[in-house]
Amino acid sequence: MKKKAAPPETTAGTRLIDSHCHLDMDAYQDDLDTVVASAAASGVDTIITIGIDLASSRRAVALTRKYSGVFATVGIHPHDAVEGCDQVYQQLRELSKDTKVVGYGEIGLDYAKNYAPKEVQLRTFAAQLELVRELRLPVVIHDREAHTDTLGLLREKGPFTAGGVMHCFSGDTDLARQVLEIGFHLSIPGVVTFKNANALRDVVREIPLEHLLIETDGPFLAPVPWRGKRNRPDLLLYTADKIAEIKGITIEEVAHQTRQNTMALFSLNALDADRVAS
């Protein structure tokens, strides 16, 4: 069995933020304490765990009580768009008042899977964008094979004064620039390490680091050499290392700037995000 490569080395004190993970999912149920502790030991001391439906959003908020370095978002993923209704939106509105809820999402459109009918996705996405404007929270966008409709609704319902991020960015440099034009960031996942991810590497090469976040999307999309395995926040170092290689800078520079970007977008400074997850 081929041995995994040693994790990228960083200097003491290097700290990263996993801007998008799903800690409430079953994949972490048996060893979540270890997962969070291993992340902190690797320098990933802050994790934003993402709500994808009402139940998931509640679990995400509950996890912020257990781990000081974990923050949450709430929302309805396009796969679960049929859940969207006034009663659910009201409960998400109430959840969003929690002091450790730092954003709304992930919300958006997914025409690759189409687990929910397109018209239902569009209706739920539009309704939640209106809620985002009301709540004045940064928004986390899911866009898979739905670039035109996603950008169209963002332009129609915007501007979004608290900003947002296109999570797990999957477009080309032209789309990336359009996302930046509406004032949003791009979040780079472990996909950037995949052999066939040339378009994403071009985006990383062309877009200034000041506009990028990094994420695991754990438990999905583990970076090479862990591709196909369960993704974990400590594996974020592989993604940061690849971005550093592409840009010809150090992993510490990537860690520092993406951390600053994430803290600014989600207002983590005010919430003492410098505490180590425990």
Image: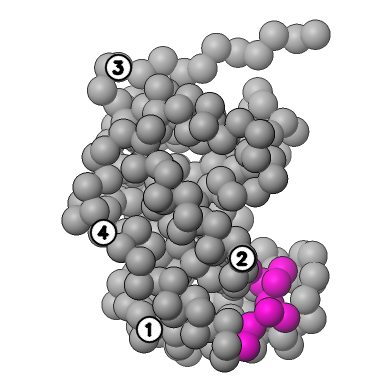
Whether residues under marks 3 and 4 lie with C-beta atoms below 8 angstroms apart, the answer is: no
Q: Amino acid at mark 3?
A: Thr
Kind of element beneath mark 4 = loop
Q: Amino acid at mark 1?
A: Arg
Q: Does the stretch in magenta take in 228?
A: no
Prevailing secondary structure of the magenta residues: helix
Q: Amino acid at mark 2?
A: Ala
Vertical placement of residue 173 versus 127, above or below: above
The image quadrant of residue 41 is top left
- Using the rendered image of the protein, determine whether residue 213 is visible from the camera's viewpoint: no
Nearest to N terminus: mark 3 or mark 4: 3
Residue 274 coordinates in the image, percent (x, y): 24, 40
Q: Amino acid at mark 4?
A: Ser
Give me the residue at 61% from left, 65% from top.
55
Measured in 3D between alpha carbons, the distance from the residue under mark 3 to the one under mark 2, in whole angstroms, is 39 Å
Nearest to N terminus: mark 3 or mark 2: 3
Write down the region rendered in magenta. Answer: 77-85
Q: Nearer the viewer, mark 4 or mark 2?
A: 2
Closer-to-camera residue (145/27): 27
Residue underneath mark 4: 267
Closer-to-camera residue (13/223): 13
Nearest to N terminus: mark 4 or mark 1: 1
Residue underneath mark 3: 11
Residue 161 coordinates in the image, percent (x, y): 29, 77
Kind of element beneath mark 1 = helix
